[in-house]
Amino acid sequence: MKEYDLVVIGAGPGGMTAAMYGARANLKVAMIDRGVYGGQMNNTAEVENYPGFPSIMGPDLGEKMYKSATKQGVEFVYGDVQKIELDGQKRIVKMDPEDITAKAVIIATGSTNRKLGIPGEEEYSGRGVSYCAVCDGAFFKDENVAVVGGGDSAISEGLYLANLAKDVDVIHRRDQLRAERVLQTRAFKNPKMEFTWDSVPVEIIGDENKVTGVKVHNKKTDEDKVIDASGVFIYIGNVPNSEPFKELKITDDQGWIITNDQMETTVPGIYAVGDVRQKKLRQIVTAVGDGGIAGQNAFEYISELTD
Ligand code: NAP
């Protein structure tokens, strides 16, 4: 079994920063991901609130962070983690294709898009239903699209789609957006953005090949209507990717990992950073901050281990 000082699970902004800090402290670091590095940044069009970059595409920022980490000696390892086992001071990361051991582990597995769970959503996924404007937006040039949700993701990705699509209809379950003010102001000013308030999607409608619209129910008037759209982009929040760590009993009842402000879980040598952590503000900048703290603390923890 391959041995490392530090294993970081997840290569989003939190994980890449934690790994970089570990490597700079001269630890032998593996950064594991089951996909491409970058995490949710790969699904983010424009990032405007990461200092130093007035505006940068999410995947480009991911690329830069990856280079920062690997330049310091971080080894990127492909793997799909099933669980972490404790064996004395050893932390065994059980994964496909090959288990590895570490003295400390930083969990940076982030979160996954929440699904609406309505008829047509799964059926038309990839055929009009999308969770990633930056990946799929170009397919809907000059067409009508709908965006579901009222948070930062829905509005920022809706604004991105407005550059491509004919019209963007934001479907929100309340009559007020949750998104930050600057995004709200921009969205209300954009002539291509329309809003369907107090409404929840009840069915994604299609012609068997692709999406043609979305049926919504207005909770105030109790009426249903169909919004014509060839794309439906769903941004209704996230669920934590913490299933592999359930047995460690480090999550709250919704699955978010509980840490203290040093990113320590209740299990010695196991830390958590970024979106998978129970926290209020989930941003690239807070994930990066978590990563720096955890990387440094993991180094101190490993230094104090007795052989
Ligand atoms: P979010 O902030 O949790 O917002 C989810 C939105 O979806 C809310 O408007 C919510 O409505 C709605 N919603 C939830 N469940 C729903 C359902 N079943 N049916 C219909 N609507 C539903 O999620 P997010 O926008 O993906 O953001 C996640 C985190 O990333 C947040 O912390 C956010 O600040 C951060 N983020 C930041 C930026 C940025 O800084 N530019 C960009 C993207 C994401 P209610 O409002 O009624 O609850």
Image (cartoon, rainbow, N blue to C red):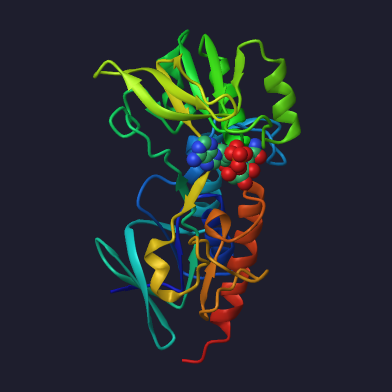
Q: At 43% from the left edge and 38% from the top edge, which residue is drawn?
A: 116
- In the image, residue 222 lies at what x, y percent? 53, 26
Confirm whether residue 63 shows in the render.
Answer: no
Residue at image x 46%, y 29%?
Answer: 201
Position above or below: 297 against 167: below
Q: Quadrant of residue 97?
A: bottom left
Instruction: From this view, report whether residue 224 is shown above or below residue 52.
Output: above
Give the vertical position of 28 relative to 215 (above or below).
Answer: below
305 shown above or below 10: below
Residue 61: x %, y % from top left? 57, 39
Rendering quadrant holding ligand 1 = top right
Q: Quadrant of the N terminus?
A: bottom left
Residue at 58 percent across and 66 percent down: it is 295
Residue 210 visible, this angle:
yes
- Residue at 51% x, 92% y: name it: 306
Can you give x and y, in whole percent of width and height, for residue 57 in the image? 57, 31
Front residue of 111 and 85: 111
